[in-house]
Image (tube, grey):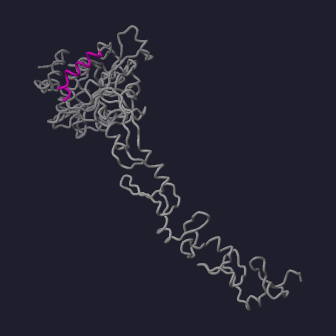
Amino acid sequence: MPVNNVCSICGNRHSNLQRGINGAKYCPDCINEHHLIRCSADDCGKYMKPEEAFLSGQGYLCEEHWKSEYAFCDACGAIIRKRYGHRMDRGKFICEHCFSVKYFECEDCGCTHKISEANEVEIDGTVRKVCKGCLEENYSTCPSCGKLKRTSSIINAKYINTDGEKKIITGCEECIAKVCHSCSHCGGWFANEIPFHEEGTCDKCYYKGNIIHNYSYKPKAVVQKSAAENTDLLFGIENEIELKFNDPNRSRYENDNESFTIETKSGSVRVDYRRFVAFHVESSIPGLFYQKNDGSIRFGMEIVSHPATLEFWRSNKDKIEELFSFLKCEGCAGDEASTVGMHIHVTRNGMTRAHQNSFAAFVYSHKEKIEKLAGRRSNGYTKMIPLPNSAENNDQTKRFEEKIINNHDRYSAVNWNNEHTVELRMFQSTLNTSHFLANIEFSHALYHFSKTRTVLECVNNDSWKNFCGFIAGNYEYLASLMTEKGIYVS
């Protein structure tokens, strides 16, 4: 039997010795006689004398395993499990009760400090406990409102006021917001009285970059009508124009080399030629027009409006005339350029299927007269669909609906592919104010004329004459244009 197989208490050799702490070994007889205790840790099981054992919630543990999970509270001496206590400096621990009475954890840096060093700060209605170091580093008094704020929220803003002067204001975000706002693109500051554009950009960033939008751009509609009006029938316009159409040197503008100065509320801005024109379009009737690029236009833009009532369009005749005069003086073309057109979106919410049938049937059954009125012949962008042969029964046949209502060709003269509007695409673009208003009046008159008539009443031999009688006295610009084109029947 090996020499080291001797009991650490009795000194006798034994074949069944048990391991003890600190390298000791014990025979079964000494374990029983001296009431040795076995460590209850799963990975231990060593025996020890009663005076060497440490009591825990898991039973008796050897010193090594007890110290790995337990400690004495440095304040009250109670046994605490380390995972539930608070670690202090130099490896000491504090129980939860003593910690809540004598210490706190800084809500900024997470470090533990004596309760006497706590500083309460109220930020946006929430009270935080922070240490002195974090108080000095993270918080400051706003020079504008005098309230304690996070230092990071106090801004030194150099802004431009409405007189074009540069001013400086220092304060928290709330105080700054009462005086000025920041451009989302360049970060510049401007007085609140200087409005930003939809993209949150200042004039300089907007007019140099975003004023002519992509073709897919579609802002939230802003309805234009007078306060006294009580109608939901609206008309949105798309009027395409070619720039410098008659200029023999037009090619020099295509690369945007020519620059112009425009005066905005936030100061002077240098822009290229297309944006120079777009600025005048957008500022002609504030809140009504915006501009888009269109692949079918060689060098120009599509002037798009928010939806407006007929009376709104009529009441702004002088401003429209002033805008069109500017565009014509700049060599822009509408009527003369075969590549551009005018589209009118008419509210279709509330239109019954019968109303839609009659609306489209009137246009398609009077192809020649409509083309004269519109100033444009049927083409790939504005197709006049031939009516089915069984015209007398069109209002009752599924074939008719499939032919002119349910077709999915968005380039039809009457386009039904938009969810909330029916689009009349057959008009030639125009910078003639009377013709422009006449086109809108035609859309308004067609809507009401077809609303109470069947398809047959919209396609028979008397339908055009009846339409002329319907507009008499109510549609000044339309009647004048129809007379000018030789299609008005009295």
Total marks shown come to 0
Residue at the image position 13 percent from the left and 27 percent from the top: 470
| In this picture, residue 271 sits left or right of residue 345 | right
Quadrant in the rendering for residue 428: top left
Residue 367 vertical position relative to residue 225 in the rendered view, above or below? above
Query: Which percent across, then down, holds residue 279?
Result: 33, 23
- Residue 178 sits in quarter: top left
Examine the structure image and report whether residue 432 is included in the region drawn in magenta: no
Does the magenta run of residues contain 322?
A: yes
Observer-nearest of 46 and 156 = 156
Position of 264 compared to 96: left or right?
left
Q: Position of residue 99 (x, y in %)?
A: 50, 68
Q: Name the quadrant of the C terminus.
A: top left
Query: Is residue 283 shown left or right of residue 14?
Result: left
Instruction: Return the x and y of residue 8 as percentages of the image width and height.
Output: 80, 84
Q: Is residue 78 left or right of residue 294?
A: right
Above or below 170: residue 21: below
Q: Quadrant of residue 198?
A: top left
Examine the rendering and report whether any part of residue 20 can be seen.
yes
Q: Nearer the viewer, residue 296 or 311?
A: 311
Task: Name the foreground residue: 69 vs 471.
Answer: 69
Task: Tell me which residue sits at (26%, 28%) in the image.
Answer: 286
- Regarding residue 386, the answer to whether it shows in the image is no
- The overriding secondary structure of the stretch rendered in magenta is helix
Q: Position of residue 469 (x, y in %)?
A: 11, 25
Q: Which residues are magenta?
A: 312-327
Q: Quadrant of the N terminus?
A: bottom right
